[in-house]
Amino acid sequence: MALLEVKDLDVRFAVRGGDLTALRGISFSLDKGERLGLVGESGAGKSVAAFSILNLIAKPGYIAGGQILFEGKDLAAMSERELRKIRGNRIAMIFQDPMMTLNPVLTIGTQMVEAILAHRNISKKEARAIALDRLKKVQIPSPEKRLDQYPHELSGGMRQRVIIAIALLLDPEIIIADEPTTALDVTIQAEIMDLLLNLCEQENVALMLITHDLGVVSQVTQRMLVMYSGRIIEQGPTREIINDAQHPYTQGLINALPQMGEPGARLFQIPGSMPSLKNVPTGCPFHSRCNFATEQCKQAMPEYVRSGNVDVACYEVANLIEQEKRMQEAES
Amino acid sequence: MTSPLVSIRGLEKRFDLSGSLLEQITFEGGRFRRKQEAVHAINGVDLEVQKGEALCVVGESGCGKSTVARTVMGLISPSAGEIHYDGQRIDNLDGKAALPYRRKMQMIFQNPYASLNPRMTIQQTLEEPIRFHHPDWSQTQVRDKIHEVMHSVGIDPDWGSRFGHEFSGGQRQRIAIARALAVDPEFIVADEPISALDVSIQAQVLNLLMDAQESRGLTYLFITHDLAVVEHFGTRVAVMYLGRVCELADTRNLFAAPRHPYTQALLSAIPKLEDDRPNHIRLKGEVPTPVNLPSGCVFHGRCPYANERCRQEVPQLIATDGGTQVACHAVEEGRL
Ligand SMILES: Nc1ncnc2c1ncn2[C@@H]1O[C@H](COP(=O)(O)OP(=O)(O)OP(=O)(O)O)[C@@H](O)[C@H]1O
Ligand SMILES: Nc1ncnc2c1ncn2[C@@H]1O[C@H](COP(=O)(O)OP(=O)(O)OP(=O)(O)O)[C@@H](O)[C@H]1O
Ligand code: SF4
Ligand code: SF4
Ligand SMILES: [Mg+2]
Ligand SMILES: [Mg+2]
């Protein structure tokens, strides 16, 4: 059994003029200790997916269907009280902005101790010892001193280390990280990603990493999901997708990277932009930008097909697989 | 050797943090003291931008990239140093004398949301700078010009009557570029023009900037923290650290053989598609604040090659055999 299994998840926002569907039939799973990358266009639903795993979608958003099975139990159907036992404890979250987690008026130590005592029945002294241990794990300079400092006294990179220490406080099974290094400089970003990767490996923690940086996905994750307009359009082993993407959007995303073109030559570009969720076209959500779009693509949403170890939602890919099969049959 | 289009000479910029005189006075050890604090954003930068090139400026947040851009554009005045355009000093010009340069030099900002006036239609947005710089043009001339720039950046003429907020980030950046091109500039300062855009849109805007450079013979000062963009787009690269240029090189040389220890660390930190793990050069600590600048080489606190001389003496940019200019004692001494 997978540690986390999301099945056919639908998330909607009740906005003026009717519901807006942010996630449409999202399904994926995460094994113990596995690292999963989540990439896609801005507004595709990556953060909404992360928040809904913890059943943290705030009004006007709601989970309209599907299941989120954590160790077999459905988080989507759990009471708020039961959920609180899981959040921050069994499943931890790291945000882009450390100040979403940190309280500016409390010391780092106080916040860490409180977070532990909310879930564990131990003494303050023991809790402080755990806090110190985690600060050491994230290799923060002078960890004892940090316990008595306030968030504003730390640099951005150090704050993000504290956030990772907090995520690790209660030995979680899963860490969900939403663009954890986007606000940081390249050299600091590299240090933090390296740290997160090493800790997840050492402690056998599963990681769900949201990022727009395909290089980071390559370095850190084993499997990846590509989202577009509220759908997972491609998922499978990271190396396989990066080296040989199947879906035209994923291909475009990779080919449009400056490093893929000859210096000075025009870059490959995907025309247009992602349609707003308020008026999603029928059929494949990518069809208005896709070079392979046919009449069929405008009619109905493509189903997933398997290509190698990758699941792809695209008619063109499905047709290619069909053709190949027929050719093989003809040969034999 | 051609003469540079823009030259930045001995540029320094401090931002005063200490507030009013009263706020500066403190009582310490039995006497009044006047305490002045300043951010040393730029600490002696010399750069020349050659006609037709794209000079990229890279470096981490707060190293002074935008301050260089804004000083060159005359949006802020330098604390010391000079800016020259086509042989003419321009940082001390006022009003009327500065006017021709306000046309020849245009700027594109990171945030396409902030740079368009929400109460203007796209037509008005494009018309305004043309009318300002060409008050004698006829209605037809203005209309033809707008038509021409709209066409060249791929704006649908139907957009003319709509307002900025109706467009996506990438579309707005297109409009901002059209606005800059509308007055036929020679030189464009672009400060992180694609950083706020979606990855799939970045390529569109980058292509547009390259097309404009080719068809209009533009010269760029291009500011970014994205090194992959630099490698693709830049003719030369200046790497900045804490308000100084630490390496200046042809793009190809910089990526093939970075010389300054900071440049080496920076390049190694870029995550690459072919990587299966992070494999960067580890640096100690983090960038110090520009309020209390380190003595000697500003990088010494994080540099694996730092020695006593580095802590004392500021290294100057020196040309190496490969043509690259590097400000590093270790490189100069042949230790690196
Ligand atoms: N509170 C809300 N009310 C209405 N719509 C919302 C709300 N929050 C999110 N959405 C919609 O859900 C969609 C997905 O948003 P989400 O934040 O998950 O995107 P994302 O993939 O994380 O993008 P980014 O890369 O920009 O962070 C967006 O199109 C957004 O308009
Ligand atoms: N108006 C100002 N007042 C005070 N300090 C300023 C001002 N403008 C810039 N600074 C400071 O000057 C330094 C250089 O800032 P600058 O904006 O040039 O950096 P940058 O390299 O463009 O950074 P980023 O990559 O974050 O845009 C920073 O420490 C910044 O905080
Ligand atoms: S289903 Fe059709 S429109 Fe969608 S990505 Fe595939 S070919 Fe393109
Ligand atoms: S001058 Fe010294 S401290 Fe500075 S980069 Fe060179 S070796 Fe390092
Ligand atoms: Mg998001
Ligand atoms: Mg800047």
Image (tube, coloured by chain):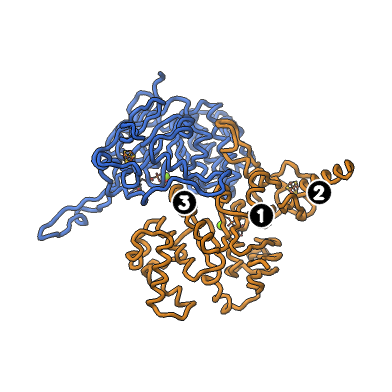
Tell me if residue A19 comes above or below residue B235 in the rendering: below
The residue at the point 71 percent across, 46 percent down is: A246
Label 1, on which residue?
A229
Say which amino acid is labelled 3. Gln
Callout 1, which amino acid?
A: Ser
Q: What element carries label 3?
A: helix
Task: Say which amino acid is labelled 2.
Answer: Gln
Which residue is the site of mark 3? A189
Of discs 3 and 1, which sits in the foreground? Answer: 3
Left or right: A270 with respect to B269?
right
Q: From mark 2 to mark 1, how far is it between C-alphas?
A: 19 Å
Q: Nearer the viewer, residue B132 or B23?
A: B23
| Residue A137 spot, x, y in % from top left | 43, 62
Numbered disc 1: secondary structure: loop
- Quadrant of res B55: top left
Quarter of the rendering occupied by the C terminus of chain A = top right
Mark found first going from the N terminus, 3 or 1: 3
In the picture, the disc for residue A296 is 2
Q: Between disc 2 and disc 3, whose residue precedes?
A: 3
Q: Chain B is drawn in which colour?
A: blue
**Inter-mark Cα distance, 2 to 3:** 43 Å
**Outermost residue to the left:** B30
Direction from residue A93 to residue A304 in the image, left or right: right
Where residue A101 appears, as percent x and y from the top left, is: 46, 66
From where the camera sits, is residue A295 visible? no
Q: Which of the chains bears the disc numbered 3?
A: A
